Amino acid sequence: MSKEHIEITPSTRVAEMLDNYPELEETLIGIAPPFKKLKNPFLRKTVAKVATLKHIASVGNVPLNELINKLRQTVGQPVTDESYEDENYFQDRPGWFSPEKIVIAFDEAKIEDKTRITLATMLIEAKDVKKGEIIELTTSFLPAPGIDRMKSMGYSVWTVKEGE
C-alpha cells in the first residue's frame, strides 16, 4: 500500500514530511547546516514530531518562503507564490527580565544526558516556578516548538541570540 503524499506547507510537521518524503532529509541539510541535527535519532523521535516547517525555518535562519518552495520543488509540487510570514523569536529585553530572578538554569553544553533537555522536562520544572521567577535555557539551537508551547500555556518567554 503506497503512502498518500502530503502537501508541503508551513504547518507541515517535520517528521510527517520526512516519513512521506525521506529524500528531503538531505535537501534540508543542504539548505541550512543546523538541520544536520535531524540525523540524531532522539531528536528525530521527539523534536521532529512537534516541529513544523515554520519552526525549523526560524531555527535554520532561512526565509520561510524559500524553505517551503525548495522542498516543494524537490518533490515535484508546484512552487507557491503565497507569501508566508517568518516567525521572529528575538525581541528586545523585556522589563520583567532580571538575572537575579533566575531560579532554574539549563545549559545544553553542560548537560551530559541530552535527553534531559526536552519540553516535558521544562514543563515539569516550570510547575514549581512562582510568578516572577525565571527558568533560563541556554542551547546551541532555537527551541521554537518549546517556545511556542510555553507561550500557549501562558508563560512569558524571551529569546536572545548571542554570537553566531
Image (cartoon, rainbow, N blue to C red):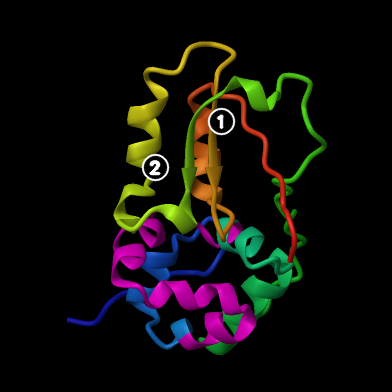
Q: Is residue 135 above or below residue 145?
A: above
Q: Is residue 50 above or below residue 122?
A: below
Q: Is residue 153 visible?
A: yes
Q: Is residue 5 visible?
A: no
| The quarter of the displayed image where residue 99 is located | top right
Residue denoted by label 1? 151
Residue denoted by label 2? 119
In magenta, the rendered stretch is 26-54
Q: Which quarter of the figure is the N terminus placed in?
A: bottom left
Label number found at residue 162: none
**Residue found at x 34% / y 38%:** 121
Residue 126 relative to residue 59: left or right = left
Element type at marker 2? Answer: helix
Element type at marker 1? Answer: helix
Other residues around mark 1 within 10 Å, as few (<14) / some (14–19) / many (≥20): few
Residue 159 relative to residue 149: left or right = right
Q: Residue 43: image x %, image y %?
A: 36, 64
Other residues around mark 2 within 10 Å, as few (<14) / some (14–19) / many (≥20): some
Q: Which quarter of the figure is the C terminus placed in?
A: bottom right
Is residue 85 rendered magenta in the image? no
For the image, the number of numbered tags is 2
